[in-house]
Amino acid sequence: MSPFPRPDYQPLKRYHFDRTPVELDLSDNTNHWGAHPAALDVLRQADNNALARYPYLYADNLREAAAAHLGVPEECIATGCGSNDILDCTYRACAGDPDDLVAVAVPTFPMSLTWARMNGMSARGVPWEDALADPERLLEDRPALVYVCRPNNPTGHVVPTEWVEALLSAAGEDGPLVIVDEAYVDFGGDSFARRAAERPRMLVSRTLSKAFGLAGLRVAYGVGTPETTLEIEKARGPYKVNRVAAEAGAAALADTEGWVTRTVADCVACRERAEVALTERHLEPLPSRANFIMFRAPTGDGRADALGIRGHGVAVRPFVEQYPGGTDALRVTVAPWPLMERFLGALDAYLGQLEAQSS
Ligand SMILES: *Cc1c(COP(=O)(O)O)cnc(C)c1O
């Protein structure tokens, strides 16, 4: 008998997508304006203690900085090694038995479905178009958890505030924990973080991997009532967020120089220019409030199109059957304009190749 006997666990695979080196990688939504300078300063000044001694048990300094950043009490913050960790711990804290359901508005971050199975729960994707028409579609069969990404990856849309309110009131006081993943909220859309600090059965997850440029450090936090954040921190051991990462993250959150504001403003400007450029090429970009744009795969075969563009030195991410209507899509991360020009150059070279083939 296998030492890993769980039948629901066996079919799981490690997360995988093509990460072979490429000249310009616009496939993973990380920050091409770089890392937050305050975090870099912390790393440059790291001393012996920073590495030789354990960190805080639960990253108290990061907690404090996140609380001050949002204007919520410290007890309302749970910390983690990236929001991947926050979300995984949240699922684990909620998991009861294999019939426990996680309802997810799809297409979205694929890990939101995988964590359910990792933690012995079942997952159900509810198409966004159905969920948008009626948030109660996410509450069918009494799920233990509901996951909503806002702004949503990979489509870039922000579900209306009233829709989230309607979902929360329909979920009610005995309903599921509602997770709002705000990984991209710094780029657009209002935040539910403060609301989550006061509302039982709600968790907002935030990360420093995107707008703060710290994906490599793995720092994030969740916001909920003190009762909710305690349950999440219980689902993980002590000393998780490393000492340097917690301190660097705290310094970035305390930013008074406006680095995030400035780089986000430039990102939004580049996003708008890129949307125009993609529209001119008849690729129907979806209006995005995040640091990426989803558009129709030129030939309808997303994987082949991504490979074709990669052939000209730029990686974008294919999504099979996830463009509205069910065709394939590509998603490009927004970067400073000279890099977007590089992307448009690769795209045009590929489109030219297609045209030459068909004539
Ligand atoms: C990138 C991303 C995250 C961030 O994950 P980290 O573990 O914090 O790096 C979370 N949620 C979504 C939807 C994302 O796209």
Image (spheres, rainbow, N blue to C red):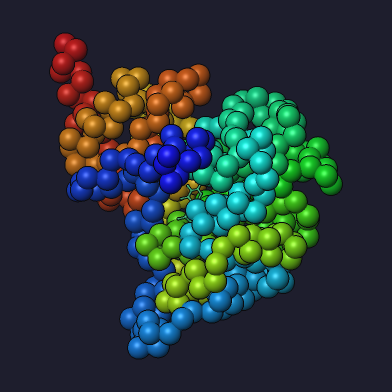
183 shown above or below 81: above
65 shown above or below 135: below
The quadrant where residue 222 appears: bottom right
Answer left or right for 77 relative to 57: right
Residue drawn at x 40%, y 80% as measured from the top left: 42
Residue drawn at x 49%, y 46% as measured from the top left: 290
71 shown above or below 323: below
Residue drawn at x 66%, y 41% as measured from the top left: 97
Answer left or right for 43 relative to 166: left
Whole-percent x, y for residue 87 in the image: 57, 52
Residue drawn at x 39%, y 39% as measured from the top left: 13
Answer left or right for 141 relative to 297: right
Whole-percent x, y for residue 310 in the image: 22, 37
Instruction: Name the foreground residue: 215 vs 78.
Output: 78
Instruction: Name the foreground residue: 213 vs 20.
Output: 20
Whole-percent x, y for residue 107 in the image: 52, 32
Image quadrant holding the C terminus, namely top left
Whole-percent x, y for residue 294 in the image: 43, 35
